[in-house]
Protein backbone atom coordinates (compact mmCIF):
# COMPACT_ATOMS: atom_id res chain seq x y z
CA UNK A 1 0.00 0.00 0.00
CA UNK A 2 2.83 2.40 0.78
CA UNK A 3 4.12 1.91 -2.76
CA UNK A 4 0.88 3.39 -4.07
CA UNK A 5 1.28 6.54 -1.99
CA UNK A 6 4.95 7.23 -2.57
CA UNK A 7 6.41 10.72 -2.97
CA UNK A 8 5.87 10.77 -6.71
CA UNK A 9 2.20 9.79 -6.40
CA UNK A 10 1.59 12.44 -3.76
CA UNK A 11 3.37 15.03 -5.90
CA UNK A 12 1.12 14.21 -8.86
CA UNK A 13 -1.92 14.47 -6.57
CA UNK A 14 -0.67 17.87 -5.35
CA UNK A 15 -0.30 19.11 -8.90
CA UNK A 16 -3.52 17.64 -10.28
CA UNK A 17 -5.65 18.83 -7.36
CA UNK A 18 -4.22 22.34 -7.79
CA UNK A 19 -4.86 22.32 -11.52
CA UNK A 20 -8.43 21.08 -11.18
CA UNK A 21 -9.04 23.53 -8.30
CA UNK A 22 -7.97 26.37 -10.58
CA UNK A 23 -10.24 25.05 -13.33
CA UNK A 24 -13.21 25.06 -10.93
CA UNK A 25 -12.31 28.58 -9.75
CA UNK A 26 -12.11 29.80 -13.34
CA UNK A 27 -15.41 28.09 -14.16
CA UNK A 28 -17.05 29.62 -11.08
CA UNK A 29 -15.74 33.08 -11.95
CA UNK A 30 -16.82 32.76 -15.58
CA UNK A 31 -20.23 31.40 -14.54
CA UNK A 32 -20.66 34.20 -12.01
CA UNK A 33 -19.84 36.83 -14.63
CA UNK A 34 -22.24 35.24 -17.11
CA UNK A 35 -24.88 35.10 -14.37
CA UNK A 36 -24.46 38.73 -13.31
CA UNK A 37 -24.35 39.88 -16.94
CA UNK A 38 -27.69 38.18 -17.62
CA UNK A 39 -26.07 36.01 -20.33
CA UNK A 40 -27.63 32.86 -18.86
CA UNK A 41 -31.05 34.35 -18.14
CA UNK A 42 -32.87 32.75 -21.08
CA UNK A 43 -30.95 29.46 -21.01
CA UNK A 44 -30.67 28.37 -17.39
CA UNK A 45 -33.31 28.91 -14.66
CA UNK A 46 -32.16 31.30 -11.94
CA UNK A 47 -32.08 28.80 -9.06
CA UNK A 48 -30.20 26.22 -11.12
CA UNK A 49 -27.73 28.83 -12.30
CA UNK A 50 -27.07 29.97 -8.73
CA UNK A 51 -26.71 26.35 -7.57
CA UNK A 52 -24.18 25.74 -10.34
CA UNK A 53 -22.18 28.80 -9.26
CA UNK A 54 -22.12 27.50 -5.67
CA UNK A 55 -21.20 23.99 -6.83
CA UNK A 56 -18.25 25.30 -8.82
CA UNK A 57 -17.12 27.55 -5.95
CA UNK A 58 -17.21 24.82 -3.31
CA UNK A 59 -15.38 22.39 -5.58
CA UNK A 60 -12.68 25.02 -6.11
CA UNK A 61 -12.33 25.49 -2.35
CA UNK A 62 -12.35 21.77 -1.56
CA UNK A 63 -9.72 20.95 -4.15
CA UNK A 64 -7.61 23.94 -3.11
CA UNK A 65 -7.64 22.72 0.48
CA UNK A 66 -6.74 19.20 -0.70
CA UNK A 67 -3.93 20.71 -2.80
CA UNK A 68 -2.54 22.51 0.25
CA UNK A 69 -2.93 19.60 2.69
CA UNK A 70 -1.23 17.17 0.32
CA UNK A 71 1.84 19.44 0.34
CA UNK A 72 2.34 18.40 3.97
CA UNK A 73 2.93 14.82 2.80
CA UNK A 74 5.12 15.55 -0.20
CA UNK A 75 8.71 14.48 0.18
CA UNK A 76 9.81 16.95 -2.49
CA UNK A 77 9.20 20.04 -0.36
CA UNK A 78 9.11 20.53 3.39
CA UNK A 79 5.88 22.44 3.94
CA UNK A 80 4.47 22.99 7.41
CA UNK A 81 0.96 23.94 8.45
CA UNK A 82 2.30 27.43 9.17
CA UNK A 83 3.63 27.68 5.59
CA UNK A 84 0.18 26.83 4.28
CA UNK A 85 -1.60 29.37 6.49
CA UNK A 86 0.84 32.30 6.44
CA UNK A 87 1.56 33.74 2.99
CA UNK A 88 5.13 34.09 1.73
CA UNK A 89 6.68 31.66 4.26
CA UNK A 90 6.92 28.46 2.20
CA UNK A 91 10.09 26.72 1.08
CA UNK A 92 9.29 26.83 -2.65
CA UNK A 93 8.69 30.02 -4.62
CA UNK A 94 7.40 31.86 -1.52
CA UNK A 95 6.08 34.91 -3.38
CA UNK A 96 3.97 33.00 -5.92
CA UNK A 97 2.82 30.42 -3.38
CA UNK A 98 1.98 33.26 -0.98
CA UNK A 99 -0.28 34.77 -3.63
CA UNK A 100 -2.02 31.40 -3.84
CA UNK A 101 -2.57 31.37 -0.07
CA UNK A 102 -4.16 34.83 -0.20
CA UNK A 103 -6.23 33.74 -3.21
CA UNK A 104 -7.49 30.78 -1.17
CA UNK A 105 -8.54 33.07 1.69
CA UNK A 106 -10.40 35.34 -0.74
CA UNK A 107 -12.18 32.34 -2.31
CA UNK A 108 -13.34 31.17 1.10
CA UNK A 109 -14.41 34.68 2.16
CA UNK A 110 -16.40 35.43 -0.97
CA UNK A 111 -18.09 32.03 -0.96
CA UNK A 112 -19.03 32.12 2.73
CA UNK A 113 -20.48 35.64 2.53
CA UNK A 114 -23.09 34.30 0.12
CA UNK A 115 -24.74 32.57 3.10
CA UNK A 116 -24.88 35.71 5.23
CA UNK A 117 -25.72 38.17 2.48
CA UNK A 118 -29.12 39.03 3.96
CA UNK A 119 -27.55 39.72 7.34
CA UNK A 120 -24.74 41.92 5.99
CA UNK A 121 -26.86 43.59 3.33
CA UNK A 122 -26.90 43.48 -0.44
CA UNK A 123 -24.41 46.33 -0.89
CA UNK A 124 -21.84 44.92 1.56
CA UNK A 125 -22.21 41.47 0.03
CA UNK A 126 -21.49 42.84 -3.44
CA UNK A 127 -18.51 44.86 -2.26
CA UNK A 128 -17.02 41.76 -0.63
CA UNK A 129 -17.92 39.65 -3.67
CA UNK A 130 -15.83 41.97 -5.86
CA UNK A 131 -12.83 40.42 -4.09
CA UNK A 132 -13.50 37.42 -6.33
CA UNK A 133 -11.59 39.26 -9.05
CA UNK A 134 -8.55 39.63 -6.81
CA UNK A 135 -8.81 36.00 -5.71
CA UNK A 136 -9.00 34.85 -9.31
CA UNK A 137 -6.02 36.96 -10.42
CA UNK A 138 -3.91 35.87 -7.44
CA UNK A 139 -4.78 32.22 -8.10
CA UNK A 140 -3.99 32.64 -11.78
CA UNK A 141 -0.59 34.16 -10.97
CA UNK A 142 0.10 31.41 -8.42
CA UNK A 143 -0.85 28.71 -10.91
CA UNK A 144 1.12 30.22 -13.76
CA UNK A 145 4.35 31.02 -11.90
CA UNK A 146 4.44 28.27 -9.26
CA UNK A 147 2.83 25.41 -11.13
CA UNK A 148 3.07 25.66 -14.89
CA UNK A 149 5.52 23.46 -16.70
CA UNK A 150 3.61 22.46 -19.82
CA UNK A 151 2.33 24.45 -22.80
CA UNK A 152 -1.15 22.97 -22.32
CA UNK A 153 -1.44 24.53 -18.87
CA UNK A 154 -0.13 27.84 -20.17
CA UNK A 155 -2.86 27.79 -22.82
CA UNK A 156 -5.52 26.99 -20.21
CA UNK A 157 -4.36 29.77 -17.89
CA UNK A 158 -4.12 32.27 -20.74
CA UNK A 159 -7.54 31.30 -22.12
CA UNK A 160 -9.36 31.44 -18.81
CA UNK A 161 -7.62 34.68 -17.82
CA UNK A 162 -8.60 36.34 -21.09
CA UNK A 163 -12.16 35.04 -20.87
CA UNK A 164 -12.55 36.44 -17.35
CA UNK A 165 -11.06 39.74 -18.52
CA UNK A 166 -13.41 40.07 -21.50
CA UNK A 167 -16.47 39.00 -19.50
CA UNK A 168 -15.54 41.57 -16.85
CA UNK A 169 -15.32 44.31 -19.48
CA UNK A 170 -18.67 43.16 -20.90
CA UNK A 171 -20.17 43.14 -17.40
CA UNK A 172 -18.98 46.70 -16.69
CA UNK A 173 -20.18 47.99 -20.06
CA UNK A 174 -23.64 46.43 -19.65
CA UNK A 175 -23.92 47.80 -16.11
CA UNK A 176 -23.00 51.30 -17.26
CA UNK A 177 -25.34 51.23 -20.26
CA UNK A 178 -28.24 49.88 -18.21
CA UNK A 179 -27.99 52.83 -15.84
CA UNK A 180 -28.26 55.16 -18.81
CA UNK A 181 -25.99 57.73 -17.33
CA UNK A 182 -26.52 61.09 -18.94
CA UNK A 183 -23.84 63.71 -18.94
CA UNK A 184 -25.18 67.24 -18.61
CA UNK A 185 -24.45 69.36 -21.63
CA UNK A 186 -22.86 72.74 -21.18
CA UNK A 187 -24.81 75.54 -22.77
Image (tube, grey):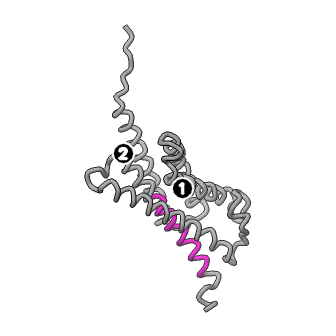
Q: Is residue 182 left or right of residue 57?
A: left
Residue depicted at x 46% and y 58% = 26
- Magenta stretch, residue numbers: 9-26
The part of the image, by quadrant, that contains residue 53 is bottom left
Q: Is residue 140 left or right of residue 187?
A: right
Magenta-drawn stretch, dominant element (helix, strand or loop) = helix
Give the vertical position of 111 relative to 68 (above or below): above
Badge 1 marks a residue whose secondary structure is helix
According to the picture, the residue beneath numbered tag 2 turns out to be 37
The part of the image, by quadrant, that contains residue 31 is bottom left
Image quarter in which the N terminus is found: bottom right
Q: Is residue 168 visible?
A: yes
Badge 2 marks a residue whose secondary structure is loop
Residue depicted at x 71% and y 67% = 81
Does 19 lie within the magenta span? yes
Q: Nearer the viewer, mark 2 or mark 1?
A: 1
What whole-number distance in Å separates the C-alpha atoms at marks 2 and 1? 22 Å
Residue depicted at x 65% and y 81% = 7
Question: Would you say the residues marked 2 and 1 are in contact, meaning their CB atoms lie under 8 Å apart?
Answer: no
Does 74 lie within the magenta span? no
**Neighbours of disc 2 within 10 Å: few (<14), some (14-19), many (20+):** some
According to the picture, the residue beneath numbered tag 1 turns out to be 112
Q: Residue 148: give x, y in percent of width and height.
A: 55, 64
Give the vertical position of 69 relative to 143 (above or below): below
Image quarter in which the C terminus is found: top left
The part of the image, by quadrant, that contains residue 71 is bottom right
Q: Residue 97: give x, y in percent of width and height.
A: 65, 60
Q: Earlier in the sequence, mark 2 or mark 1?
A: 2
Q: Residue furthest left?
A: 42
Q: Residue 163: give x, y in percent of width and height.
A: 41, 52
Residue 69 is tagged as none
Amino acid sequence: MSAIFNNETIWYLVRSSGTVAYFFLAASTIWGLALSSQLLKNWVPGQLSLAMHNYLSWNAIGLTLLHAILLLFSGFMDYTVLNLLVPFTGPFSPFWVGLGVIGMYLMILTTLTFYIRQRIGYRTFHIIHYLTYAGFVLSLLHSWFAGTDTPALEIMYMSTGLLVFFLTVYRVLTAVSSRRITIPQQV
